[in-house]
Image: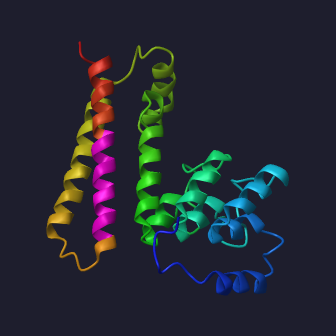
Amino acid sequence: MVESAEYPNREGFEGWFKREGWLKKWPLHLAAYSGDEELINILCSEQECDPNLKMTDWYDSTPLGWAASAGHLGSVKLLIKLGADPLVPPNNAGYTPLGDAIREGRLATAQFLKDYEIEKLGSLREVHHNFLSEEEEIEFSEGHDEVNCEEIYFGIQKFLNLTDQRWQRLDNEEFRNKSHADEIAIEAGFFSQQAANYSQVFAAICKD
């Protein structure tokens, strides 16, 4: 599935890729950007290419990021099935696979990756991974005995405030750039979900 008629000409892209001398060096990245699911399967399953391999010639980008940039949702799903991690840190250009999809206006792919992120971060441990201190994280995983309920409460407020900020930006958006408005809406939904996740943790652990 390709999201947009604006998808770059495959022959032109492959020509550029070959001129850079990358064809043999980064075949999985090319297959990902081209949406060649059969070749992706062969490269990962038979030739044992690493689906998380960083392309050192191009910002340490991953095959998943290239597939997301092109809006090949089928290739994105296949790469994840084959072991690609959508939750990798941003590449050297500052983009995660989700960021690549949003940047290029691949809204269906962006929504899928955002839903994936929310689903994975929905577990109690993962929700707190980027919020609790290392000591609190250990305590949390060992039985929640000393979890700082005040910190969790402020986490709820933090995400609610971020959600409100996004909705306010949407209210002020003149919608001259639809992809920008859609990006803001996706962010608002994500922060709202995170607030809900924190609320569930607070209710379960701090209700007394």
Q: Quadrant of residue 168?
A: bottom left
Q: How is the image coloured?
A: rainbow
Q: Residue 88, image x and y in percent? A: 58, 51
Q: Is residue 118 above or below residue 167?
A: above
Percent of width and height locating residue 108: 42, 61
* Residue at 54% from the left image edge and 49% from the top image edge: 87
144 relative position to 39: left or right = left
Query: Quarter-wise, where is residue 119 in the image?
Result: top left
Q: How many marks?
A: 0
**Does residue 97 show up magenta in the picture?**
no
- Answer left or right for 147 relative to 54: left
Q: Residue at x 22, y 75 (%)?
A: 175
Q: Residue, x 66% and y 87% (percent of image)?
A: 12
Give the answer, above or below, for where 154 lies relative to 170.
Answer: above
Residue at (65%, 65%) from the top-left corner?
32
Place of residue 164 in the rendered image (x, y in percent of width and height, measured from the top left): 19, 52
Q: Would you say the magenta stretch is mainly helix, strand or loop?
A: helix
Q: Would residue 62 be visible to someone looking at this image?
A: no
Image quarter hosting the C terminus = top left
Q: Would residue 18 appear left or right of 204 to someone viewing this image?
A: right
- In this picture, is 192 found above or below 23? above
- Residue 73 to residue 25: above or below: above
Q: Which residues are magenta?
A: 180-194
Closer to the camera in the image, 69 or 197: 69
Looking at the picture, how far across and down is residue 26, in whole percent? Answer: 77, 68
Asked whether, in this view, residue 39 is left or right of residue 183, the answer is right
Q: Nearer the viewer, residue 147 or 27?
A: 27
Question: Is 188 contained in the magenta span?
Answer: yes
Q: Is residue 61 visible?
A: yes
